[in-house]
Each structure stands twice: as structure tokens, then as C-alpha cells.
Image: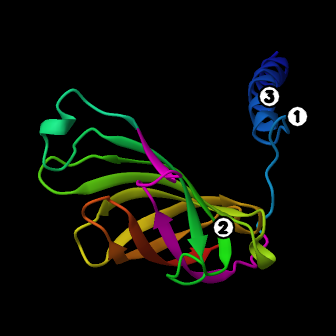
Amino acid sequence: MAKSEHVSRMLVVLITILPLAAQGSRQYSWANQLEESGKEKVTNLQFYFHDTLSGKNPTAVKVAQAADTNKSLTLFGATFMVDDALTETADPKSKLVGRAQGLYGSSCKEEIGLIMAMSFSFEDGPYKDSTISMIGKNSVMNPVREMPIVGGTGIFRMARGYAIAKTNWFDPTTGDAIVGYNVTVHH
């Protein structure tokens, strides 16, 4: 009798544990664990961002604003959609290497600060059809600003890193600007 009780208990334990153990190794049709390649690269990119709010063909346009935006010295609440040229040098006529597409909005009441959500889409060389994504605060009055790179596509899939921005030229009347970007990306 004792032996049969022992076998019964063992069967109950096995029936309870086996499904739990099998669940840990289950493959799902919608998700598979991939092995890491271990071949991470680091790429440094230098380009110039041409933000044009003026003229007949602006590349940055205001798409929204708060009721009090026009009363704010920092334009708090204004949101702009952009499709800005990225060039090899600060000269607007230099080689086009890509476009900055996304949005930025005035997010600070006490300083001129933008929240930027931008994809740098490259159109030239080995990076053609690849993008890097940047999102972060841009305190535009600081001579040097740092913003995080949070992702990418193509060659830059799984990218992370940082972008250093320095204003090269700014027209306070129109808001037009040329900003140099030095971007370091791990991918």
C-alpha cells in the first residue's frame, strides 16, 4: 500500500511539473529568440541640417500651436513638421546626403528648447535607404547640444548612440538655420 501511495504522489508531482518545464522551452509562431552576431560596428557621420521656415518652399512648417503660443517668448506649444535637406558641408548647394524628416516642438517655457523626433534618412553611398532615429531635447541657445540616437533601419538596424549639434548659421528674422551634426552610432 505504501509503495502504491508513493507512486501516486510521484505521478501527481510529474503531472504538475512537466507542463511547467515544457512551457519554458516553447517556440511561438510569432516570436523566436535570435542569436546575437557579436559583430557590432561604430559609425561616425558628419552632415549639415538645413532648416528653412521662410520663402516659397519652406522645409519646416508650423502645424499646430497652443492658444497662448504667440504670447510666449519661447513659442511654447508650437509644433513644426520638417523635411529638411542634409548636406555634406554647410553650403546649401553642397552634395545632398539625405533628409531629416519628423517634427519638433517648443517644449520649454523658460528657455528656447525643442523636443525633436527625427529620422535622418540617407540617400547616398553605403547608407542609402538606411535611417537613424533621434529623439530628445534640443536647447538651441547652447553652443553644443547632445541628443540620443534611439534606433534605425537598414545598415543602422538596432542603432543606438548620440548626436552632437552645433548651430552653424541662424537668421533671427526668419528662423532659418543651418546646424552641423556629428553623429556616433553603434549598430
Which residues are the magenta region? 37-62
The residue under label 3 is which amino acid type?
Pro
Amino acid type at image mark 1 = Ser
Query: Closer to the observer: label 2 or label 3?
Result: 2
x and y percentages locating residue 123 in the rendered image: 74, 67
Disc 2 element: strand
Identify which residue is drawn at 21% across, 57% down: 112
Residue at position x 30%, y 33% in the image? 65
Alpha carbons under labels 1 and 3: distance apart: 19 Å
Vertical relation: 187 (above or below) 133:
below
Q: Left of 107 or right of it: where is 167?
A: right
Q: CA distance from mark 2 to mark 1?
A: 37 Å
Q: How crowded is the residue under tag 2: few (<14 C-alpha within 10 Å), some, or many (20+)?
A: many
Q: Residues within 10 Å of mark 3 (few under 14, many from 20)?
A: few
Name which of mark 1 and mark 3 comes first in the sequence.
3
**Residue assigned mark 2:** 98
Residue 29 circle label:
1
Secondary element type, mark 3: helix
157 vs 65: above or below: below
Q: Nearer the viewer, mark 2 or mark 1?
A: 2
Spatial separation of the CA atoms under disc 2 and disc 3: 53 Å
- Amino acid carrying mark 2 in the image: Gly
Which residue is label 3 attached to? 19
Q: Mark 2 or 1 closer to N-term?
A: 1
| Residue situated in front as seen by the camera: 66 or 39 | 66
Q: Nearer the viewer's eye, disc 1 or disc 3?
A: 1
Whole-percent x, y for residue 2 in the image? 78, 20
Q: Which mark is residue 176?
A: none
Q: Residue at x 22, y 42 (%)?
A: 76
